[in-house]
Structures are given as structure tokens and as C-alpha cells.
Image: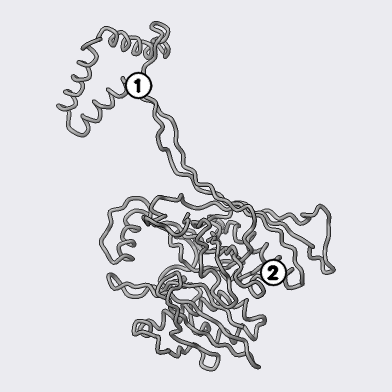
């Protein structure tokens, strides 16, 4: 059996010399007794998996020792420690697919060197300097809180082995990560890019490539759709308001003398040609406002101030995605997978209590992707589907389980329900912006 992890980014170097190494780990085994495993570290040119080559291997015989191949570069060998940690984490993410008991898991950990890696706090890019869990100021999580090792579950189980080339929906769970504020975010962007401070305001971008703590893989359901919306609203501004705004803006930007000139100009407009009508309209308007009679001008003249109506942009909207799946297990193995999938989402979306009970920490978040052409042994999620929409990081706002979707109570002999129906409602955590699509003149994918 051979299973390959998803691609991870390991950042090495500092400043202008900072680089990204894209790797995955392929696990082959178990073979023999006691069970033996071979792991292969695969290097790519980019996150899409271009130019695949094996740069090193490890085995149960020589725990944690990387045997470099001729494809390994000097940069790979210099960063052996970081690549080893990344590989160990990758093996850990797929261990449930290749190891079914405690002995096999122990041998797999030995082969990958996980027993020698203090990697419980490492993120996916191999940077051990970042905290493993809690957001700043929230303290430790309550005991029995699950913040890692949610497992990898595929339903139906034949999706992986019996239907090569089938497309699927991949849902990764991640620990919630807050955004950095102000100068910290700008400074981090400069470090990551090896350049200068950009002078950007507001919050920085959330790292979407951080460690996956669990994965569920399901067939793409019918009726999938997305809806991009932004908020526009009508607004009005009377000539009197425009004149007052002009005076105020001129005073603020150019000083009191220029403001006085602007006020004089507006007065001349009112007293120039047709001045009697304008003065009468202004008198009625101001008198009505003073007396609280907003319609005085209309009552006395039958006219209204020109509202100068315009449709103006208000704000972007964040997209919602709803999915519904019927999970009908056909074996004891699939029944346990269904139970674990339901538990995966229910526990992952639950709020996290701090140990002091003073705070409630944010639930885990999710990374969704439609994937194209799954193949046995290939990395889950290697190819994003180019002709379906992409997702930004999402929060799971609602999860519903119907235990009797057929309208009657029906179980197998062991009590497992004959069928479950789950409904999920995800909401993206930030809006989609124009620059998210890039500026390709002839795009080859739909994007967001």
C-alpha cells in the first residue's frame, strides 16, 4: 500500500534569502512481520506539484535518518532538520490510512523519525517558533480539549481505491488563527517577501497554509453553487448640503482663507441669476428645519430640493456554502467512518473553553477545496478543480444530523443507523477581493 500526503511549504533562510520548499511524503507499507515502512520525501517546484522528484528516503531500519538521493540539492541537505519535521508531520496526517493498529503506528513513527521530533507544536511550514495552540491572552485550553489528531476519513471507502479519477470535496480542519494588527502585520509581510515595509493599514492576511489537524474527503454533491454579492445603496445630497460640504472641505484642506472664498462663491451663486427663487427656496428650507417642518418648501412652492440621488458602494458580503450528504454505511468499517465524520465536524465547530473558564476561544476553522482526478497513492488534494469555484478559509456555522432520513427508525444489528443525513453551512471568514483573482488576461480557471 502506498499513500502520499498533501503538499506542505517549509520556509527556510531569512530576509532576502528566505525561500519556500514544497514537499510531500509518500508512505509505503506495511510489509513483513514486524511491520516495516518506507517513507519517501518528494520535492516540488511549487505548491501545485510541478516537477516531482524524490530527494530522500527513511525506513524503520534506520529511524529518522534521511538517505539523500541524487535529486537532493545542497539547500535540501542544509535544511535537513526542518524537512525532517515537516515530513514527520505529513506522515502523522496520513497514519490512519496506512496503520491500523498500535504496533503499525509505532513502526511508522519510528520510520518517519516522529519519535525524535518535538513536533506537536510545529506548523505545516516547519517553523517551530510559533505557538501550537492558544491565541494570545486566552490561556491554555480546558483539559480533554481536542486541538490535534482529528484523523483522515474518506467516505465512501471505495472513493480512494475503486474509482480512480473521481473528483471529490476535501475539507481540512485547522486551528483558528487571528490576524496580526497594524505594524506587526506589515513588518511580517516585509520579512516574508524579503522587501521593505509596504505601508499598508489594517490587518494582515491570515496564513492559510498552516498545519492541517484533520481531513474529511467526500464525493462532490449535486446542486453545488456559489453566489458572489456586494452591498450597494442609494444616497442623496441636496444642493445646500453640497455647498456646505464644499466650504468645509476647502477649509480643511486649504485653510480658512480659501474656505472663506469658497463660502463667498456659494453665496454669489445663490444671489446671482435667478437669485430670488434660490433665496426663497433657501429661506423655506432653513425655516422648515428651524421649525421642525421638513416639508415647508413643498407646502409653499410645490417643489423639493434636488436630492442628487446616486447608487454608492457600501461593503462586500461574505459567501455562504451549504452542503448535504447522505451517509449510508455498507460495512462495519464504513459505519465507524461515518460515526467519526459526524464527531469530526461536531467537535471541530464547538467553542473551546480556557482552563480558567475566563475565556471562550474560537472553534477550529476549515479549508475547503474541490479536487480533480483522485488517484490511488497520489496526494489527496494535489489538483484543485479548475472549473469549479475556490473557497477562502471558512467557519462552520451550522451542522445538522438527521438520524432517520428515510422517515423511519432503522439500524443494523450493532445499533448503527442504516443511514445518516448531514447538512453543513460554511461561511467564509473574509470577503473575496478583486486581486484574489489575479490579473491574467486569459484565465484558465474560474477562481473564487
**Which residue lies under the disc numbered 2?**
337
**Label 1: how many residues lie within 10 Å, few (<14), some (14-19) or many (20+)?**
some
**Which residue lies under the disc numbered 1?**
238
**Label 2: how many residues lie within 10 Å, few (<14), some (14-19) or many (20+)?**
many
Q: Is residue 327 left or right of residue 227?
A: right
Q: Please provide percent x and percent y for residue 148.
A: 56, 69
Q: Please provide percent x and percent y for residue 337.
A: 69, 69
In this orientation, which residue lies closer to the viewer: 96 or 2? 2
Label whose residue precedes the other's in the sequence (1 or 2)? 1
Among the 4 quarters of the image, the one containing residue 196: bottom left
Secondary structure at badge 1 equals loop
Question: In this figure, what is the number of numbered marks?
Answer: 2
- Which image quarter is the N terminus in? bottom right
Can you see residue 128?
no
Up the image or down, 71 lies above or below 182; here it is below
Q: Please provide percent x and percent y for residue 246.
A: 25, 27
Can you see residue 239?
yes
Secondary structure at badge 2 equals helix
Q: Are marks 1 and 2 in contact (CB under 8 Å)?
A: no
Q: Residue furthest front?
A: 442
Q: How is the image coloured?
A: one colour
Among the 4 quarters of the image, the one containing residue 14: bottom left
In this orientation, which residue lies closer to the viewer: 384 or 106? 384
Q: Please provide percent x and percent y for residue 440.
A: 37, 57
> How far apart in space, not on screen, are marks 1 and 2 (Cα)?
65 Å
Q: Is residue 95 left or right of residue 342?
A: left
Amino acid at each position: 500500500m502506498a499513500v502520499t500526503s498533501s503538499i506542505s511549504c517549509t520556509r527556510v533562510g531569512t530576509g532576502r534569502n528566505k525561500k519556500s520548499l514544497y514537499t510531500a511524503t509518500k508512505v509505503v507499507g506495511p510489509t513483513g512481520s514486524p511491520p516495516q515502512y518506507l517513507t519517501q520525501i518528494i520535492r516540488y517546484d511549487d505548491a501545485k506539484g510541478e516537477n516531482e522528484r524524490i530527494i530522500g528516503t527513511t525506513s524503520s531500519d534506520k529511524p529518522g535518518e534521511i538517505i539523500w538521493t541524487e535529486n537532493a540539492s545542497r539547500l535540501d541537505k542544509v535544511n535537513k532538520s526542518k524537512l525532517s519535521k515537516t515530513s514527520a508531520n505529513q506522515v502523522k496526517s496520513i497514519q490512519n490510512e496506512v496503520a491500523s493498529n498500535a504496533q503499525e503506528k509505532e513502526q511508522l513513527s519510528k520510520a518517519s523519525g516522529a519519535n525524535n521530533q518535538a513536533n506537536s507544536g510545529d506548523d505545516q511550514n516547519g517553523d517551530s517558533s510559533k505557538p501550537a495552540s492558544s491565541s494570545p491572552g486566552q490561556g491554555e485550553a480546558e483539559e480533554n480539549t481536542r486541538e490535534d489528531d482529528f484523523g483522515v476519513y474518506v467516505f465512501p471507502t471505495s472513493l480512494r481505491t475503486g474509482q480512480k479519477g473521481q473528483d471529490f470535496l476535501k475539507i481540512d480542519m485547522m486551528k483558528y488563527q487571528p490576524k496580526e494588527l497594524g505594524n506587526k502585520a506589515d513588518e511580517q509581510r516585509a520579512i516574508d517577501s524579503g522587501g521593505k515595509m509596504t505601508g499598508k493599514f489594517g490587518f494582515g492576511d491570515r496564513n492559510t497554509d498552516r498545519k492541517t489537524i484533520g481531513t474529511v474527503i467526500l464525493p462532490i454533491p449535486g446542486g453545488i453553487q456559489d453566489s458572489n454579492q456586494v452591498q450597494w445603496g442609494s444616497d442623496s445630497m441636496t444642493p445646500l448640503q453640497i455647498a456646505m460640504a464644499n466650504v468645509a472641505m476647502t477649509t480643511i484642506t486649504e485653510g480658512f482663507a480659501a474656505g472663506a472664498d469658497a463660502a463667498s462663491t456659494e453665496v454669489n451663486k445663490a444671489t446671482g441669476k435667478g437669485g430670488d427663487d434660490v433665496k426663497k427656496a433657501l429661506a423655506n428650507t432653513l425655516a422648515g428645519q428651524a421649525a421642525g417642518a421638513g416639508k415647508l418648501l413643498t407646502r409653499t412652492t410645490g417643489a423639493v430640493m434636488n436630492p442628487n440621488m446616486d447608487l454608492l458602494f457600501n461593503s462586500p458580503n461574505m459567501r455562504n456554502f451549504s452542503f448535504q450528504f447522505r451517509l449510508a454505511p455498507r460495512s462495519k468499517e464504513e459505519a465507524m467512518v461515518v460515526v467519526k465524520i459526524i464527531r469530526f465536524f461536531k467537535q471541530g465547530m464547538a467553542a473551546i473553553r480556557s482552563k480558567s473558564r475566563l475565556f471562550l476561544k474560537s472553534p477550529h476553522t476549515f479549508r475547503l477545496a474541490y479536487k480533480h482526478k483522485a488517484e490511488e497513492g497520489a496526494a489527496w488534494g494535489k489538483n484543485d478543480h479548475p472549473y469549479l469555484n475556490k473557497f477562502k478559509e471558512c467557519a462552520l456555522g451550522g451542522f445538522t444530523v438527521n438520524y432517520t432520513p428515510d422517515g423511519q427508525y432503522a439500524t443494523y444489528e450493532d445499533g448503527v443507523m442504516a443511514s445518516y443525513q448531514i447538512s453543513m453551512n460554511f461561511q467564509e471568514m473574509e470577503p473575496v477581493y478583486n486581486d484574489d483573482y489575479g490579473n491574467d488576461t486569459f484565465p484558465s480557471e474560474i477562481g473564487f
